[in-house]
Amino acid sequence: MSFTYLELKTAIQDFTENSETSFVTNIPNFITGVEDRIHSLADLEFFRKNATAALDADDPYLSVPSDYLSSFSFQITSAGSQGFLEIKDVNFVQQYTLDAGATGLPRYYGVFDVDNFIVSPTPDSSYDVELHYYYRPTSLVDSTITLNHSASVGTFIAGEYVTGATSGTVAQVVTVPNNTSVTISPKTISGTGFLASNVGSGTTYGVTENIAGLTNGATATTTTLVSPLTWLSENAPNALLYGALVEAYTYMKGEADMMQLYEQRFMQEMQRLKDLAEARENTDAYRKGLPERPRT
């Protein structure tokens, strides 16, 4: 089992039996809320990322990746050899530069502000660096659905809304890659999803519905929808579902026993994810052997 955004949105409404307008409007917040909980509770390899860059000579600052949360390691290459910088408080890094009084091969780094790292000593030449860091993956809510269509009459534009003539579905265009497709924001979709509420990742569904842009009147006929998955929606769908239901029942001020049930189910799923993150991803049978459990 896995969830696209539309499938998870439908499941939340089905479980809660709630299609009230403000509730549906807040479903994206329920989903991002549980994604944040999972992100803080399980240290999955999925939340790790690498980025390469170059330090410039005489410039102690380096831009922080936009999705950066914290560091695992900061590698630097000098004369073909790799080493690692030590993370320090910004005050220490700046004081070390003052004490050293010269440029050279950086030895320390710190998070100067939300946009920049600072290294010390100030680089005496350009150095290649690689940052291994903890990041926030793209939310299922922020994924986009590709809506393929026949060659359009007129031009769809980013930011406008398109509507389906049969379903009455409305969604906002994010990008217009070419004359036969647009990407749409799933959290703006109202209606049945262009007659394809069961769209799946990697699979296309014929929909054959006339669509029109609401800004300049471009028209076309839809051919396929491609709705993406995220790692969590594919590998931890129950954790997403039950965690979102906890968020939903909190919003609804729902029954305490149902909220407790969904919280228990969520924590059961989180235990499985923590087992993956903390016991399976960081070891193997060659080093540790197969896990042993007492016989019952």
Image (spheres, rainbow, N blue to C red):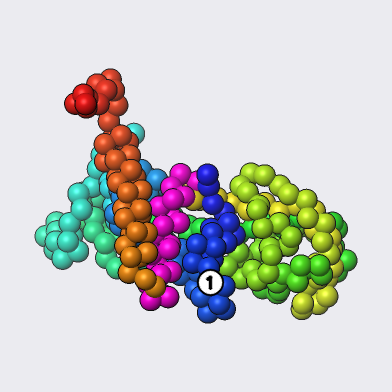
Secondary element at image label 1: loop
Snapshot quadrant of residue 276: top left
Residue 138 location, x and y as percent?
48, 57
Snapshot quadrant of residue 146: bottom right
User: Is-magenta flag for residue 1?
Assistant: no
Viewed as shown, does residue 280 lie left or right of 249?
A: left
User: Is-magenta flag for residue 252?
Assistant: yes
Residue 282 location, x and y as percent?
28, 35
Q: As shown in the figure, which amino acid type bears the numbered disc 1?
A: Asn
Q: Which residues are magenta?
A: 234-253
Viewed as shown, does residue 210 lie left or right of 189?
A: right
Residue 26 makes an appearance in the image: yes
Identify the residue under disc 1. Answer: 18
- Residue 267 vs 25, above or below: the answer is above
- Residue 251 vs 108, above or below: the answer is below
Snapshot quadrant of residue 89: bottom left
Query: What residue is rendered at 25% in x and 26% in y?
Result: 291
Q: The C terminus is located in which quarter?
A: top left
Pick the front one: 15 or 155: 15
